[in-house]
Image (cartoon, coloured by chain):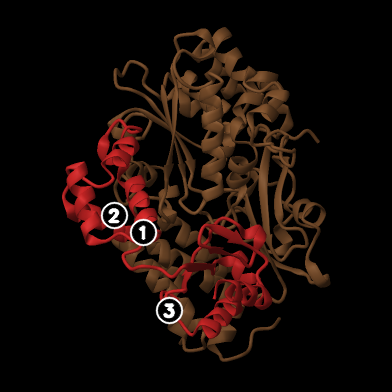
Amino acid sequence: MEKIVTRHFGQENSHHLINYLKDNGYQAARKAITQMTPAQVIDEVKKSNLRGLGGAGFPTGTKWSFIPQANPKPKYLVINGDEGEPGTFKDKYIFEQDPHALLEGIIVTCYAINSHKAYVYIRGEYIKSMENLQGAIDEAYRAGFLGKGIFGTGFDIEVVIHPGAGAYICGEETALLESLEGKKGFPRLKPPFPAVVGLFGCPTVINNVETISCVPPIINKGAEWFAKLGCEKNGGNRLFCVSGHVNKPGVYELPNGTTLREIIYEHAGGIPNGRKLKAVIPGGISAPILTPDQIDVKMDFDSLKAIGSMAGSGGIIVMDDTTDMVWAAMVAARFFAHESCGQCSPCREGSGWVYRNVKRIYEGLAKDHDLNNLPGIVNNIGGNTICAFGDAVSMSVGSYVAKFRSEFEAKIKGHVCQT
Amino acid sequence: MEYKQEFDKITSRYEVKTAALLPLLHFVQEKEGLVTPEAEGKIAEYLGMPVVHVHEVVSFYHLFHQKRKGKCHLSVCQTTACALHGAEGIIEHIQKRLNIRPGETTPDGKFSLSVVECLGACELAPMMQSNKEYKGFLSKKKIDELIDQNN
């Protein structure tokens, strides 16, 4: 299988320009800027079926086309490298191992949307990511790939890293913009969408690190080649992050549409100690949990949606048959309670309420009504908040209760859960 | 003003000066080990914003510290992948070894313990951040070695 985003991973000095240049480095940026119009670049990306790989799966070229070019304000590109969705750790590898691929994607994207400034928001804990990307930015400036009049044209571009400071919510794109503007990360009401009113009130495209790293190969090899690698409406490959109870946790680049079974048992080496699969989160902690009978699902956005879960960020967390699902629900609920930003009452109050409720059940202190109330509480958070975090609390915790209700009931009856 | 030159350099990257608040706070914390009320005042004055706005931001983001942390600050992840690999036991072991609870610092100022949510390194579970460095596949033995090295 042809690797795209991970093609340079593991090579010596893969994060340095000298290595990146060996493999047609910055030729896509040169081609886009010197031979294509911005509209042609957008069209090519649309045809490639590249979709937003941060989790939402929105068609990338379409997003770029929403930037109102008649608006006289500056346009911005913001790269979301906040990577906080539990189970997800792919962007870190791109920052550390191939930051020039991201930079080249940034150049092409900025050209396509007529932006001269890109901010890369990186979570504050990713020190090495920031170091390697800053090193690559410095190299690119020295080589003339960034700065004024690149490739002998009049096109200027500046790239700045913005460090986050430890808040999951800042991965939500409008909270990220607030954080980038020097405020606490409270998501904004939409509309207006960032494409119209984004950073500093200007039209802004926000894309994930992996998404933008796919752009140079699309320009080099063509939209058709990229679209063919994936499945219907999902071009290219995807980085799947596998963790939990597997023999070989790690990042695997595989075609969109690979089955979850293949990822767990072939690529990630199966479950240790001959244990059986009990449950699996397919796309980061926010994605509804799946049971073993569901793992023949193809791991693209549309197939996972069709079975009531989501492809999300590509973070797969595997749980074997020793896992206490009430405990696992409590761990998820604790995460949400900790990370709710506090702006909307249903989420601020509800996420804590859900956590305390599940914790009571886990600790054997709950009564029947605690379990009976739980679906109602989670359903009253989802759909009633400014951002999708509230929906995530609902979908995630709600799915544990729906699929493993007997374990919750057993705890209330005081029985030890069957393992 | 102290740090004026460095502040100017950081803010020059942004179209709107106040956007530099997070990197300025990171800079001050790196220099001083924490963000004091005095530092909040200095930054507020420099950026021309109310000091309460700076304080609000400092208290919102958990990477900003209003109290000095120990020389070795252990932030142990407790989220799902790490939890499945025994994060609870790791946290308990550190508490016993250092005789502190999460959020506390040893009286000699050598160690602080924080329990945190996902650090984006689930492939290393169970893992933690020790100052700036990620440390994975933790075991009681590895924790003991790290504590002995820093003691």
Label 1 sits on residue: B64
Query: Dot 1, how many residues are within 10 Å of its Cα: few (below 14), some (14-19), or many (20+)?
Result: some
Decide which of A135, A286 is in the foreground and name it. Answer: A135
Disc 1 or disc 3, which is closer to the eye?
Answer: 3
**How far apart are the two marked residues, 1 and 3, measured between alpha carbons?**
22 Å
Front in this rendered view, residue A155 or A415: A155
Taking the image as shown, residue B150 lies to the left or right of residue A391, namely right
**What letter labels the chain drawn in brown?**
A
Tell us which disc is closer to us: 2 or 1: 1
Q: Alpha carbon of mark 3 to alpha carbon of mark 2: how far?
A: 29 Å
Marks 1 and 3, the one that precedes in the sequence: 1
Q: Nearer the viewer, residue A187 or A102?
A: A102
Disc 3 element: loop
**Image coords of residue A32 (percent x, y):** 57, 14
Q: Which mark is residue B108?
A: 3
Dot 1 lies on which element? Answer: loop
Instruction: Please name the amino acid that badge 2 sits on.
Output: Val
Disc 2 from disc 1: Cα separation: 9 Å
The red-tinted chain is B
Give residue A413's quadrant in the image: bottom right
User: Which label lies toward us, 3 or 2?
Assistant: 3
Residue at coordinates 60% horizontally, 27% vertically from top-left? A215
Direction from residue A97 to residue B23 in the image, left or right: left
- Location of the C terminus of chain A by quadrant is bottom right
The amino acid pointed to by label 3 is Asp
Q: x%, y% of residue B18?
A: 26, 40
Residue A27 seen anywhere in this rendered image of the structure? yes
Using the rendered view, name the quadrant where residue B106 is placed: bottom left
Residue for badge 2: B57
Q: Quadrant of the N terminus of chain A?
A: top right
